[in-house]
Image: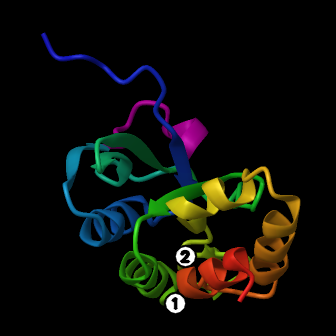
Amino acid sequence: MATVQKITPCLWFDTEAQEAAEFYVSVFKDSRILRVLHYTDAGYEIHGKAPGTVLTVEFEISGQRFTALNGGPHFKFSEAISLEILCETQQEIDYYWEKLSEGGEEGNCGWLKDRYGLSWQITPILLGDMLSHPDEDKCMRVTDAFLQMKRLDLGELVKAFEGE
């Protein structure tokens, strides 16, 4: 029997649920659309969506399941929640930064909003180790360095950590 993911984030879109899910699946390896459900006549007086319109898209990104919902224009994404991508190399950081920021908005400290307004953090795995190091001077140098960056530069963070 297959195991079921206990918690699945549901992402609220106006009308772009399927488009967004297809975009995310194209960006991440080992990702796929699982199921697309459509509105029916049932509940039309509440949802106001034409029968056959996409209701939800269930998809998986690198083993993590998500649901994208076409719920209308009532709610928008904010930075109050973001999806963090832990990266091992600068090449990986650059790949996700380029793909996800296209048509979106670059933020500070490795944060960006994609074309749908969803916030992402593109973070080198090494950053957590650097910031939790017992040498406070190293931590402060790394913090000072990444606070000046938009896309995080792993080489510059390492230099700051080493005191170069």
- Element carrying mark 2: loop
Q: Is residue 23 left or right of residue 46?
A: left
Instruction: Provide the residue designation for mark 1.
Output: 103
Query: As drawn, which residue projects farthest toward the top?
Result: 1
Q: How many marks?
A: 2
Q: Is residue 18 left or right of residue 73?
A: left
Quadrant in the picture for the N terminus: top left
Instruction: Provide the residue designation for mark 2.
Output: 114
73 or 41, which lies in front?
A: 73
Q: Which mark is residue 131?
A: none
Residue contact between numbered discs 2 and 1, judged by CB atoms under 8 Å: yes
x and y percentages locating residue 111 in the rendered image = 66, 73
**Residue at 71% in and 89% down:** 164
94 or 9, which lies in front?
A: 94
Give the amino acid at mark 1: Gly
Dot 2 alpha-carbon crowd within 10 angstroms: few under 14, some 14 to 19, many 20 or more: some
**Residue at 36% in and 41% down:** 64
**Residue at 37% in and 37% down:** 41
